[in-house]
Amino acid sequence: MINIPELLCPAGNKESFYAAINNGADAVYLGGKLFNARQTADNFTDTDFEEILDYAHVRGSKIALTLNTLYKNSELKDVFAFACKMYHMGVDSFIVQDMGTAMKLKEYFPDIKLSASTQMSVHSLDGIKYFEKLGFQRVVLSRELSLKEIEHIKSNTNIEIETFIHGALCVCYSGQCLMSSLIGGRSGNRGRCAQPCRMVYSLMKDGDKIDEGYLLSPRDMMTLPILEDLAKAGINSLKIEGRMKSPEYVALVTRAYREALDRIKSGEGSLDENAVKDVAQIFNRGGSSTTGYYYNYAGSTMMSKLTPKSTGLYIGTVINYRDDRTGKCAIKLEDSVIAGDGIEIWTASENHAGAYINKAGEAGEIIEVLVKGDIKRGDKVYKSYGKAVNDKGKNLITQSKKQLEIEAEVSVKINEPVELLLRHKNITVRKQGELCTEALNKPLDEERIIAKLSKTGNTPYALKFKKVNIDGNIFVNLSSLNNLRREAIEEFQALHLNSFKKEAGDIGFSIKFNPSYSGLKRLTAKVENENQLKAAVLSGVYRVYCPICEKEKIQELSDFCIKNNCEFYLYPPRISRNDLNESFKSFVKAIENSSIDGYLVSTFGELHIIREISKKKIILDHSFNIFNSLSQGFYKSQSDAMTLSMELNVKDMQNIDGENTEIVIYGSQVMMATHQCPVGLYAGQKEKGKFCSLKGSSGRYFISDRKGEKFEVLRDCDNCIAYILNSHKLSVINRMTEILDTNFEFLRLSFLNESEKEVREIVLKYKNAMENGENDDLEEENLTYGHFFRGVE
């Protein structure tokens, strides 16, 4: 038999919560008014939590609390006060992104389940093993992993695995996106994503436009057709996205997946096409859904290039339109409509025309609606609002079908009180009722007694009788059986709810800040090639980071750095899946006896590998999202130095220790790491799979927004990953005195396309500014301070 996974559903407000529980959610994830990755959802008050926790628990469902954002030092005390309150109320697990927060929660509340959020960008077995060693019980995998990779992970770890099965897809690896904050100052890492990926962009090469549209907007995921494959893979929890979606959406989608999982469990396993149609109607982008990355590395079939909004379902075509005062539009239907449905006609212009249906029509019929717009014969028509589906969703919200099954025993013996026993896990209730007597006529039989005791009605419990001991020829007052059942269930419920409450006094959280660093400030450089490396080293940087290359070349470059008194570190790819990690392991072993100083790592998988098999030094890159002193303190035990998040400002940095800590002060900032390479999709014509017709080709590509800002698309064609760069290069040299006041030991210059001459000039200018404590200027346009002087919300 297939081990059916947990169905984990979203709730952004109370109505959505009830929609999830009442339609079969095994668990619900939700957040408070603060401290979670959906700050713009309604979310829940402390009073709400008392109500919803009881409602979920008596029905056998669990609540996962989302503490899945990055926190500033000034916020930590309130975060832990909130977590303590929720622990006492009985939440079942914490979903966490900030590592310092996670480890402190583990210390305070060792008996609660700790889940590593998808915001931690865990995308390899070695990354999983890192969290397993730290004592996490569950990891939410990056959405980009294939089913084959997930099966490999499950067969090699004991930790629980959670994956997304339905809803919106982020085009970027979660936790690695700076696009929202750099463009609009709203951080996706802090739950305030402005969704710049849902905007219009043009793909450019050499000033020529190749394509235009919503180039970074993926379709929504829907895995009902492959759900049995996911269940067989051993995934522990299947997660539906949608804390910003409507309660009707939550109800319909939860019900569809609950019924599908129940069919799989019973061996039926057949796909309910009506359910597929309903969930597509309630919300989808682009007119259809995708099964995500489970069987597809990437491709245009996963993208919603024409629109980022919910479109509903295709239902017909315009066959005639009178462009006059009446605006009469004739539509040939390919699917039925009813009065109250809403339609959208996809016109050549982006402002599509919409109208409501006032008369039912069947497939094959021609209907006429009144609508104004730039409508042409042949335009496609979509049902953007399905009245029947939305009505169904509304009805499902409050129709509770979920009950907790309780083991029951009953004893009905002549001249003894009727005795009812209820048992669930470690809770046992034994109640006695009225005396049973011998029947003078019409004795009660076992079937009638059990039927009476089983009538739990609207309670959240269902009694499953495991042991029955009933004499023959007996009489018991039926109303007394009702009273007995009611009293037993009331006592059981009180004990059951109390079992989730936990003792939690004031944890007394405090943190000592030690921000000062009085030693020398050192300049480091991250380079892309040998020429840049030599230019930076000869210009006097203290440390250089170089990409992994051939073993022989590494020793040559290492010798060069030693000769010039410069530390030499290697950095592996920013995204490293299972296959890359295996080759990285072999590489680390092969050069362990070389003279390199260590590694600059970007992922938890890389960190785990080096800690396991190497004695070289470890420096953590900014991709670890180190945002506060608590995380910094934890990572000191895991590394030799670290780089702070690029979303902090100088004020936020004041209380963070500067020793062995680095900040990036110059360079092209990566805003997004994505499998959905715009070049491959829209110039290389990749419909699906890995690699495109332009793999390895030359040329610089950009995506341009409506304001004319150009964001370079940096292609890693060997691994088929695209990195989208900010349109403005980071540089703080003309405010260097303020940067020097932050007291960090290491200041990094990050080079990408710069020539040797440019590298030398930039290094020398920054060195001079540091040594003399003064400001300077670079002869470049389109520079930005990044977040140093504005930060993020």
Image: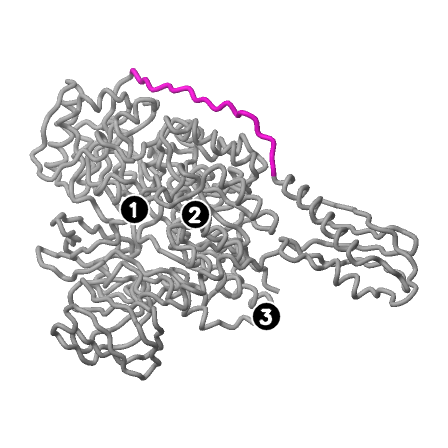
Disc 2 versus disc 3: nearer the observer: 2
Q: Name which residue type carries label 1.
A: Glu
Disc 2 versus disc 1: nearer the observer: 2
Up the image or down, 543 lies above or below 740; here it is: below
Q: Name which residue type carries label 3.
A: Gly
Residue 667 belongs to magenta span: no
Residue numbers of the magenta segment: 501-518
Where's residue 26, x and y in %? 55, 53
Quadrant of the rendering where the C terminus is positioned: top left
Q: Name the residue beneath numbered marker 3.
A: 267
Residues packed near mark 3 inside 10 Å, few (<14), some (14 to 19) or many (20 plus) = few
Tell me how far mark 2 sits from mark 1, CA to CA: 54 Å
Tell me how far mark 1 sits from mark 3, CA to CA: 53 Å
Residue 590 visible? The answer is no
Q: Name which residue type carries label 2.
A: Asn
Tell me how far mark 2 sits from mark 3, CA to CA: 35 Å
Q: Name the residue beneath numbered marker 1.
A: 550
- Lower position in the chain sequence, tag 1 or tag 3: 3
Observer-nearest of 538 and 474: 474
- Residue found at the far bottom of this picture: 364
Residue 502 belongs to magenta span: yes
- The residue located at (41%, 29%) in the rendering is 76
Residues packed near mark 2 inside 10 Å, few (<14), some (14 to 19) or many (20 plus) = many
Task: Kindly check if marks 2 and 3 are in contact, taking CB atoms under 8 A apart as contact.
Answer: no
Return the mark for residue 499.
none
Q: Secondary structure at mark 1?
A: loop
Q: Relative to residue 423, is residue 45 drawn left or right?
A: left
Q: Name the residue beneath numbered marker 2.
A: 13
